[in-house]
Image (cartoon, rainbow, N blue to C red):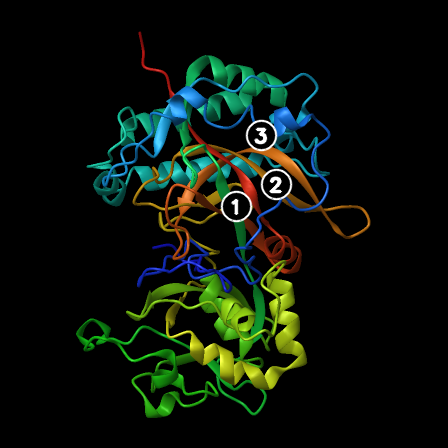
Amino acid sequence: MNTLLTKRLFSLGKNPKKLSLGILIFGVPVFFLTYLVSLQPLGRLALSPERCHVKKWNLPQTTAKKTQPTSTGSAVLVLRPWVTCCENDTSCFDHQIWGEDETIADQKALINSINQSLKYLKTPKAEADYRNYPVTGITRNNVIQSLIRFRELLQTSKSARQLNDAVRREFLIYQSIGGDKQGGVLFTSYYEPIYEASRVPTSEYRYPIYRVPPDLKSWKKPHPTRLDLEGADGLQASKSKLKGLEFFWFRDRLEPYMMQIQGSAKIKLADGSETHVGYAGSIAQNYKSIGKSLADDGKVPLEGMTMPKILDYFRKYPQELSIYIPKDPSFVFFQENYGVTATGSTSVPITADRSIATDKALMPPGALALIRAHLPFPNSQGTMEHRIVSRYVLDQDAGGAIKGAGRVDYFTGTGKVAGERAGVTVGRGQLFYLLLKPKS
């Protein structure tokens, strides 16, 4: 599992007993978006015609009608013709590689992310992960060769269009059937928060996170719940199986809980030093969204709910943390990763804007993907502007709430801005995987 918990604070779906950091997995990023009842694209979209936004990128009707997913998931990825870009549709290409969309180019970040996937793909874990992968044409060796060739094209191409044209000539494209069997995929985001903490408890730093109990595997099921382990106020661990496992303490009770949602965090200590913590394990209890609990009680409207709204509610009514946090029976344990940043389910560091989390029971781990999604970016006024982008990413993580062919979690990075972006990401898009054409 990855080190970032991708469980969403406000996810409405049922999460499995195991979370994967994949950041998000538990919800590693601090601000997450809730699954909204009406999932509409947010903000201003690209300037190209609507037919370029949607119809061009959906599964072709003749292909969609043939997709009948099996219990093995063998039909969740469908080989399809390449999308023909509309004229003057700038959102069709990954301009960010050269900094055409943003002030800073991130070609080096993409190359680093490719290298991390290649590192994972050469491990025994990857060999085992791909041993029975059900989609014809997608093998570990093919994924490796595809990444190596894509990296070469990336390093020699002079523009987004040139790279796109080269990839179209040499690669096949597989599309996820999505949650609607038409290619529609729900995108959310996660990130790695930064918190201040202490290695010892004080009157100011009272709320701990915990290491994995050494006897966790022998715990009788059903496991004790969050309420059983830490009490309603989050301070009763000395009376439970958590006694002696505390290893960092925080000022705000919501911070350790958010870390369990996000799956990891960067820690700043009083002496000026920094470290990282990541997902290490969890109890056998299903996650329950406190966002949904708030909506069920009429405290925050479900429609339009976002992580910032949830956090704002608890800032106004901090006493209610003792009511709503215990309603989530799940519980996550951590380990100190020192200088290692957020790590995905592939056990390699993930990269801001270049790593995604998907359901690893269905999707090829470490593979090169292309996403088409509504994503938020800070503008010159300091506010978030949403636009449709096409972006090359690496599938390097998993998440407790990221299940099925219709879900993707997008890693926005570390810190405040990354959290703000993750908190307002929700919308429909498409997911594709790129594999080299067979040699003739």
At x 45% / y 63%, what residue is drawn? 338
Which residue is tagged 3?
54
Q: Disc 3 versus disc 2: distance between alpha carbons?
A: 11 Å
Q: How far apart are the alpha carbons under marks 3 and 1?
A: 15 Å
The quarter of the picture where residue 314 lies is bottom right
Q: Does the CB distance between marks 1 and 2 fall below 8 Å?
A: yes
> How far separated are the C-alphas under marks 1 and 2?
8 Å
Pointer 3 with pointer 1, Cβ within 8 A: no
- Sequence-first disc among 3 and 1: 3
Q: Secondary structure at mark 2?
A: strand
- Residue 353 seen anywhere in this rendered image of the structure: no
Q: Local crowd at mark 3 within 10 Å, few (<14), some, or many (≥20)?
A: some
For badge 1, the amino acid type reads: Phe
Residue denoted by label 2 = 374
Query: Mark 1 Cα within 10 Å, few/some/many (few <14, many 20+)?
Result: many
- x then y, percent, for residue 97: 61, 31
Vertical position of residue 158 compared to residue 244: above or below = above
Q: Is residue 360 visible?
A: yes
Residue tagged 1: 187
